[in-house]
Image (cartoon, rainbow, N blue to C red):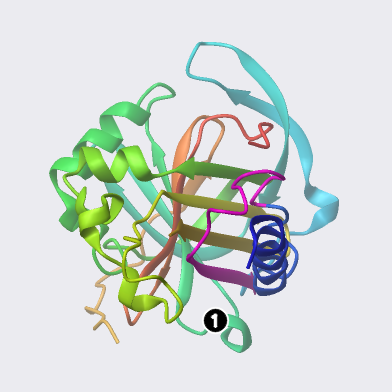
Amino acid sequence: MVGEQARKEVNLWIEKHTKGRIRNLLPTGCFSDSDAAIVLASALYFKAKWCVPFDTSKTEIEDFHLLDGQTIKVPTMKMKGKSFHFASFKGFQVLRMSYRSADYKYFSMYFLLPHKRDGLKQMLERLNSDPSLLVGNLGTREAPFTKIWIPKLKFSYQLEARNVMEDLGLVLPFKPSGEFTKMVVSAPDSEKLCISDIIHKSCIEVNEEGSKAAACSLATTVVGCARIPKPPPPRTFVADHPFMFLIKGFKSDETVFAGVVINPLLKD
């Protein structure tokens, strides 16, 4: 395929496989007709409804406290009088909200909220030093809630990952010596194919109904339950400052999406 034709076909494939969530990932003129011997693409689309959805009539504008000390107003989903899985660690707490069985039977969204408004960095440092905290269901168990506040989210993120991969020591695929020629039947014997870049884009929307998320990457060239002696005390979970989220499988322990929310109003 010549460059512009290849670009259009790849963009259409991505749009189709992400249900229209990611469009025009490759911009016009991103490679010339002499480029793009190989385009490797993968896409993931995730849409699921909460087991216990939020009531849209309860969503209100509330304060959200940014890391620089500013306060902004954001649409905030609200719920009370329900039970969800919860865990508390030194410096942060975890709320687990499950998706409907008909959608994704064993998937849940985890909200990791620092106790302090400016505690995101410390929380991420702890998780980085002790990844075991993110294994399984993150130690959550069912507890009643008197208040749950979570901001509505809708944003996307794009990364050109070649520099990141090279910084991690993965350099061979980006050199002619990486040799991807055998992947292409029509490639001349004298032409050494390599990967010029890796582009990743993801987007997610979290609302009263549930979650919609999509991701695409391009390369060019039953946990047991212990008996609880007494019910846990009622909890509150007010995500009015920066937090982390995960969408992960309950049985497979597979994390399909992860991110950090600094400002719920930012789209990119």
Of the 4 image quadrants, the one containing the N terminus is bottom right
Instruction: Please report the residue visible at 68 percent of the width from the left and 37 percent of the height from the top.
Output: 267
Q: Residues within 10 Å of mark 1 (few under 14, many from 20)?
A: some
Asked whether 137 or 187 is in front, the reply is 187
Q: Give residue 150's position: percent from left, percent from top.
A: 61, 45
Q: Does 214 lie within the magenta span?
A: no
Asked whether 103 or 89 is in front, the reply is 103
Instruction: Please report the residue visible at 65 percent of the width from the left and 52 percent of the height from the top.
Output: 25
Q: Give residue 242's position: percent from left, percent from top.
A: 49, 32
Residue 190 drawn above or below residue 77: below
Q: Amino acid at mark 1?
A: Tyr
Q: Which image quarter: residue 156?
A: top right
Secondary structure of the residue carrying numbered label 1 = helix
Instruction: Please report the residue visible at 64 percent of the width from the left and 50 percent of the height from the top.
Output: 26
Q: Give residue 192's position: percent from left, percent from top.
A: 31, 60
Q: Which residue is mark 1?
A: 104
What residue range appears in magenta?
Answer: 25-48
Of the 4 image quadrants, the one containing the C terminus is top right
- Residue projecting furthest to the right: 57
Residue 89 drawn above or below residue 95: above
Q: Give residue 131's position: percent from left, percent from top.
A: 18, 52
Q: Does 36 lie within the magenta span?
A: yes
Instruction: Please report the residue visible at 46 percent of the width from the left and 42 percent of the height from the top.
Output: 160
Residue 151 can be seen, yes or no: no
Residue 176 can be seen, yes or no: yes
Q: Which image quarter: residue 163?
A: top left
Asked whether 16 or 234 is in front, the reply is 16
Residue 2 drawn above or below residue 120: below
